Amino acid sequence: MSTSRNQTHEFERSDRKIREVWITASPKAGSGAGRNQIDQLVTLLRGRGIDCRVTHSIDALQKRVADEAMGTQQFAVVAAGGDGTIALVAQNLPPEIPIVPMPMGTENLLARHWEFSPIAADVAATIERGERFQMDAGLANGKLFLVMVTAGMDAEVVRGMHLTRRGHIRRWSYARPILRALSRYSYPIIRSVEDVSEDVDEDVAGDLSGGGNVGRDEQCKAVVVNGPIDACWMMAFNLPRYAAGLGIEPDATPNDGLLDVLAMRRGYLWSGLNYLARIKLGWHLLHPDVTRRRVKRMTWTAPDRVPYQVDGDYAGRLPVKIEVLPNRVTLLQPSKA
């Protein structure tokens, strides 16, 4: 009996072994060294008998996935680029196809959270040995995101970068967009209204205003509060990550079926600098201006033209409807060569 079980287990493992990989690379992302790693990865995978192809075309990837004759049970996609590239790939794949991030962006927030490597040998090891696991995603006006969505001053900076971007972004590339935003942005009030029309669980959603020193288990027992949030800085996190290593929402969890909303009420430069200092020190969650909630769905609106960004990419202007997509994305557990 034990032998039969072992044979079945080995058959299941063999049946799920990755035998075909498409590497989807962003034309704008990555340096020359990163491109060399892609070439090395192709060589490594082909040397191990894995069919491999590099593409810059999402349309081509969609056609491959839709080819029923080829199947996708032993198929995986390497997303070579930044957080936006990974989200774009995920949006165009069904949930069951595994993705391996190969970080080549500026921040690489998702890759840092899960400890994915940009080194070809490590990516190949992940494809050969990595176990599949799932994480939530979010949707903002139909655009999938994996890390966060924000509206306000920081999104205005991202919009400025979008208007001037030429090739690979480095941290100093943000200097001009920041100065531009400081001189022009007027900090309109943003309103967040939670949508509780479907399946809201009172044990896992609640008002966390000023809850920086409250444990997560206690927070999850909070009473549902449906009142709107009005603030100049509005953010919703799927992962506890933000640019420059800022721990704005440290309790965000990517597999709880919820998004963690954090709003900071006051606008203008001096308030932003005050919030930034508190974030750096880890004190901001205790500030009375900060409101925290966990939600499944919400809508952000503003009386003026306010931009929003998803995973570091400019996505448009408010209003935006946001929702969580539980277990939407499959990844492979990172391995080292």
Image: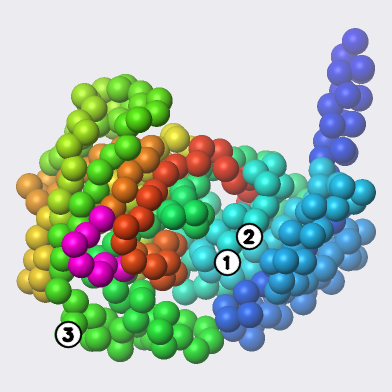
Q: CA distance from mark 2 to mark 3?
A: 35 Å
C-beta proximity under 8 Å, tags 1 and 2: yes
Q: Taken as a whole, is the magenta stretch helix, strand or loop?
A: loop
Magenta span has 225?
no
The answer, for residue 5, to whether it is visible in the render is yes
Sequence-wise, which precedes: disc 2 or disc 3? Answer: 2
Q: CA distance from mark 1 to mark 2?
A: 6 Å
The residue at which mark 3 appears reads as 183
Magenta span has 302?
yes
Q: CA distance from mark 1 to mark 3?
A: 30 Å
Q: Which residues are magenta?
A: 301-307
SS state under label 1: helix
Give 312 or 13, whichever is nearer the viewer.
Answer: 312
Q: Residues within 10 Å of mark 3 (few under 14, many from 20)?
A: few
The residue at which mark 1 appears reads as 85
Mark 2: amino acid: Val
Residue 139: mark: none
Sequence-wise, which precedes: disc 1 or disc 3? Answer: 1
